[in-house]
Image (cartoon, coloured by chain):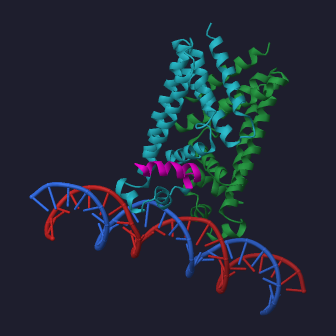
Chain colours: A cyan, B green, C red, D blue
Amino acid sequence: MSLIAACARVLAREGAAGASVRTIAVEAGVSPGLVSHYFAGVEALIEATYGHVEAQVGAALDAAVAAAAPEPRARLDAFVTASFAPPIATPELLATWIGFWTLAIARGGIARQHDSHYAAYRSRLEALLAACGVPGPSLRHAGIAIAALVDGLWLELCLSPQAFSADEAGAIARAQIDGLIVRQF
Amino acid sequence: MSLIAACARVLAREGAAGASVRTIAVEAGVSPGLVSHYFAGVEALIEATYGHVEAQVGAALDAAVAAAAPEPRARLDAFVTASFAPPIATPELLATWIGFWTLAIARGGIARQHDSHYAAYRSRLEALLAACGVPGPSLRHAGIAIAALVDGLWLELCLSPQAFSADEAGAIARAQIDGLIVRQF
DNA sequence: TTGCTTGTTGAACGATCGTACAACAACTGC
DNA sequence: GCAGTTGTTGTACGATCGTTCAACAAGCAA
């Protein structure tokens, strides 16, 4: 469905405020009426777009991990490095994501979608951390910690690009992971 | 100016989407025309509100640090603990902040305001870390790391409250800080 | 060719948006 | 009491919002 792709492009370019039925329809090259014809409303379209963007992000992260060396630590490092490089760390994806957050606050549907996305993201991270030797009991907190750290770095990297570089973000994240893994004596 | 307070309340309750001139005017108990009379436009009002909310958050953090024991580590811990408790870690403040981010993407004025806020936040954190013995050369990366970690934990704590508790967030942040400080042998 | 289904259009509706402005109330100095 | 300033009101305007719907185009079975 090209309406979803058009919606994603508009969200990336103009943020949540610009994601109107007409803007999306023009972007997709169709008439405004089509949006209501295929989706229950503009919100349902954005919900579907959330799933689409989420899948793309997941695929990009998976590809980075798959392309890395087979050592567990190299795979974990590839995961965080990819988080700070395009197509993940871009102002466009941040704009898209902030649009989703905006709707997650007001509407339950998007909020539930975010919860499951966040849970999947953490379990992906937990698997990588477990392979690096982080023991089971620490896994939950380690996953939350690295997820929060990477999220926070990603956010500020997109929002204030001049504050620090992607390389710095990667170095900082790797240093924290070092601390986490070393501490599991 | 009660318009600013009303704008902050509306942003907290309804997010960026609900922050219209009329909604804010009703919240403040004045007529819609007053907004355009006192501010160049709705955007200028939101920009002023940003400064107001930012000052409130800063004051809450300062108060928490001031109320803590005089030991440097206790002061740092008070800073992060306060970050995960009301009035900082609430869905309302997140909604407000996301509204600001939405505008920061589209408009340069808010973006510059965010940059200075973020820089101030990091330097506050750097001062606390320096007092705990983190040496100068590591200070910059340590500040970015803890700022990102606390931001990420704060974000998910507000967005997915059932994923982990405020106590867990505090414990995770303190554990990471332990690792940072211990490593400066 | 005819009839039916499917996909799409674009105009129209009522609601709401930000802004502008003439009018009105309240207070001040004279 | 009376001008003048200041603060506030509420209506009006044009633009844009999401949604609806009668109408049209295209493909296909009969």
Q: Position of residue B99 (x, y in %)?
A: 61, 50
Residue A1 in the figure: left or right of residue D24: right
Residue sitting nearer the eye, B37 or A157: A157
Residue A128 in the figure: left or right of residue B34: left
Place residue B41 in its image quadrant: bottom right
Residue at the image point whose x is 47% and y is 29% from the top: A120
Q: Quadrant of the C terminus of chain B?
A: top right
Does the magenta run of residues contain B94? no
Say above or below: A155 vs B101. Answer: above
Place residue D9 in its image quadrant: bottom right
Residue sitting nearer the eye, C3 or D21: C3
- Is residue A130 visible in the rendered image? The answer is yes
Q: Which residues are magenta?
A: A1-17
Does the magenta run of residues contain A3? yes
Q: Position of residue B102 (x, y in %)?
A: 61, 50
Residue at the image point whose x is 62% and y is 14% from the top: A181
Q: Position of residue A29 (x, y in %)?
A: 46, 59
Q: Quadrant of the N terminus of chain B?
A: bottom right
Residue at the image point whose x is 80% and y is 35% from the top: B123
Q: Position of residue B3 (x, y in %)?
A: 67, 61
- Is residue B161 visible in the rendered image? The answer is no
Residue at the image point whose x is 56% and y is 11% from the top: A133
Place residue B66 in its image quadrant: top right
- As drawn, the residue found furthest toward the top would be A185
Magenta segment main secondary structure: helix
